[in-house]
Image (spheres, rainbow, N blue to C red):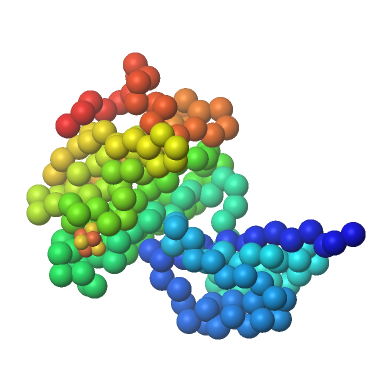
Amino acid sequence: MEEKQISITVLLPAGKLPLDIMDKARELARRFELGVYCSLMQNLRLTNVPESAVATVKEELAALGADFKGPGKFPLPRVCVGKDHCPLGLVDTKAMSDKIISRFAGREKTKAKFKIAISACPLSCSSPKATDIGLVATKKGYEVYVGGKGGPFPKVGRRIKREAGPKEALDIISELVDFHHQKTLSKQRMSKLLSDPEFPFAEA
Ligand code: SF4
């Protein structure tokens, strides 16, 4: 019987790939004949990992500080390159992503399946308006969108806040995630919650 193969996803905050992890992934890919896929969520996925090699692959990457996607983990924000690398950028998206990670990463048993995206200007290259929770930087602060999604029936998120500072944006995310947790059995997109009579934010 052919050996089962699985995928391993290495989480890359703000889409940044450390060179030592890149080198190790390349070496593992050659050793075990793996595929390498840069996911739309800006993570690194190793595909076709034989079941017998999973522990080795994880151990060798973890030794370099790699963290892996898994059930119950708070989602890493998808971000555009931000002001350091785009002339239109108004904010440092990695810094905002880091703030979100440091506030929520320790949160256990996060219920699937919402995503977060941040864009450094209204052009919205990271699709924050088509994501469960989206932050769009403007000259006056963040606009916060909720309930956007792609898939076969895409939706544009509802704007629930304008001109939010970073701290206020984090507090809003916190309230949204708590509401999602309270109203969700196992998994649910944020869009399903917009019509809940207790949804805590009006359109802004
Ligand atoms: S959203 Fe704006 S700042 Fe970000 S990459 Fe696109 S144009 Fe540049």
- Residue 26 appears left or right of 121: right
Please state, as top left, top right, bottom left or bottom right, where the N terminus lies in the image: bottom right
Task: Specify the quadrant of the image occupied by residue 91.
Answer: bottom left
Residue at the (69%, 65%) spot, across then down: 48
Q: Quadrant of ligand 1?
A: bottom left
Relative side of 181 to 136, left or right: right
Quarter assignment of residue 46: bottom right
Q: Nearer the viewer, residue 202 or 182?
A: 202
Residue 166 shown left or right of residue 4 in the figure: left
Total marks shown come to 0
Image location (x, y in percent) of residue 121: 18, 56
Q: Residue furthest left?
A: 140
User: Can you say whether 133 is above or below 51 in the image?
Assistant: above
Name the quadrant of the C terminus: top left
Residue furthest to the front in view is: 152
Q: Where is residue 105? Give x, y as percent.
A: 47, 53
Q: Is residue 133 left or right of residue 39?
A: left
Picture coordinates of residue 40 (x, y %)? Answer: 44, 58
List the single residue furthest toward the top.
197
Residue 106 can be seen in this image: yes
Picture quadrant where residue 72 is located: top right
Residue at horizontal 53 percent and vertical 49 percent from the top: 73
Instruction: Depth check: give the residue in front, 60 or 107.
Output: 60
- The residue lying furthest to the right in this view is 1
Q: Residue at x 48, y 48 (%)?
A: 74
Tell me, yes or no, if residue 59 can be seen here: no
Image coordinates of residue 18 in percent, x first then y, are: 46, 77
Work out whether 25 lies above or below 83.
below
Q: Which residue is nearer to you in this view: 42 or 35?
A: 35
Q: Residue at x 76, y 66 (%)?
A: 50
Position of 77 relative to 199 (above/below)? below
